[in-house]
Amino acid sequence: MTNSETRGGAAAQEAQAPDPYIDHAEQGLSELRKIRRLMLCSFLLAMFTATYFARDVLLPIVLAILLTLTLRPVVRGLQRIGIPPGISAVLLMLAIGLGFAVAGYFLSGPIGQMAARAPQIGMEVQFKLAGLMDRLASLREVGEQVTEMADAAGATDEKMEVVVDQSGPIPSAVGSVASIGSSLVAAMILTLFLLASGDFYHRRIVEASPKLHDKKRALTIVRDVERQISRYLGAITVINAGLGVAIGLALWIIGLPMPHVWGTLAFLLNFMPFIGAIIGTVAAGAFALVSFESVPYALLVPLAYFTLTTIEGNFVTPMLVGRRLELNIVSVFVTVAFWIWLWGVPGAVLAVPFLVVVKAVCDHVPSLKAFGSFLSGDPAMKAEDRDADGREQNGKPATRAA
């Protein structure tokens, strides 16, 4: 072996040998990443804890921001025809306040009567459902007997219990609704100031960005969030109004007293995804059991209510909102469950708008696009919708494969 070959082999071995400085640097970077993740988790935990305890302060602010994002296009459109933002903001808030006042005036009497009759309604419902209660009681007795047998056999580690849970979402919902009035008034006042300021805060957000591309991205995010929130809340309001009219007409045909009240309640409850339909169905069914002598005929009321809300949730809303909202059902359900736990009834109303804002921000931030893709709907369906939209814009009929 020549000297050159020997030197070449030694150089190759030195090149393949691990460098202790590089290993130390990589280990340090790994530790820094772990510390960064830990600090991020600690920050999120602290933020959610503060959000939970600061609900009374944050709720009017969040409501005001959502109302501002929803009504900003209206104010901007009125500004184009010569109406200043301050005047249009006052007119919009007066219209919304007048609508709430009129609705509260007409609904306060019937709802107050139903609330006063709540104990009596509960007793009558329990009396008419005595057979079902007896079956539940027998199941409970069977469960207690199984538990006694397990204890007698020496099963001390695990116990089997069958418990009939008599709690429900309605008592907690009623307690939460009692504090919404003051928060709504404060939110409307703050919304008035935000709308009257015009694009002041838009400019401040853009000016806070240091670079030109950051300014463009910030402005794009703000406009996209504004557009998606206004479209979503506007479409949901129209859909819920149609659902309220349909439920009111259906209950009027069945013969339930005060169908207009139940239609209005359906309109309001449907702003809470998933649980709103359940609460409305149970409440309307209980009232129907008291109002009608025949139990089978009374069951037509919850059946009609549940059928109409099912049609709205599975066909109408996905058809009108789903293509632009692009959120998968799992992320919506998890977000709603989390915000119900965090803020109760207001959290259920604000859950989906909050998710829309998060999705819009993630779509424009490269480091968050993976999370935004997780929140999105089915990619195949979105591609199909984009192809259909493109064919429609080119003047060709949009056809879908069966």
Image (spheres, rainbow, N blue to C red):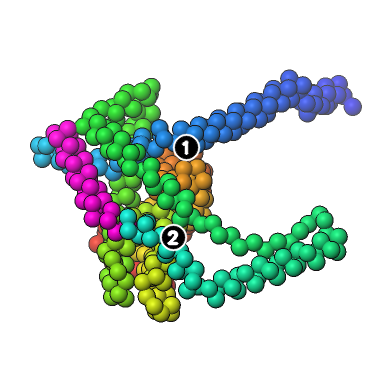
Main SS category, magenta section:
helix
In-image side of 379 versus 108 (left or right): right
**Which residue is located at x 36 percent, y 71 percent?**
291
Q: Is residue 396 above or below residue 14?
A: below
Q: Quadrant for the C terminus, please.
A: bottom left
Sequence-first disc among 1 and 2? 2
**Which residue is located at x 66 percent, y 30 percent?**
34
In-image side of 2 versus 187 (left or right): right
- Residue 95: x and y in percent read 18, 45
Q: Quadrant for the N terminus, please.
A: top right
* Disc 1 from disc 2: Cα separation: 56 Å
Question: Which residue lies most toward the left here?
Answer: 82
Query: Which amino acid lies under the numbered mark 2 shown in the image of this protein?
Result: Pro
- Residue 119: x and y in percent read 44, 60
Q: Is residue 187 above or below residue 134?
A: above
**Residue topped by disc 1:** 366
Magenta stretch, residue numbers: 84-111
Question: Which residue lies most toward the right here?
Answer: 1
Instruction: Name the front one of labels 1 and 2.
Output: 2
Q: Secondary structure at mark 2?
A: helix
Q: Secondary structure at mark 1?
A: helix
Q: Quadrant of residue 359?
A: top left
Residue 101: within the magenta?
yes
- Report the number of discs: 2
**Residue topped by disc 2:** 119
**Which residue is located at x 43 percent, y 47 percent?**
175
Q: 10 Å neighbourhood of mark 1: few (<14), some, or many (≥20)?
A: few
Foreground of the two, 212 or 325: 325
Foreground of the two, 319 or 345: 345
Residue 150's disc is none
Query: Which amino acid lies under the numbered mark 1 shown in the image of this protein?
Result: Pro
In-image side of 360 versus 243 (left or right): right
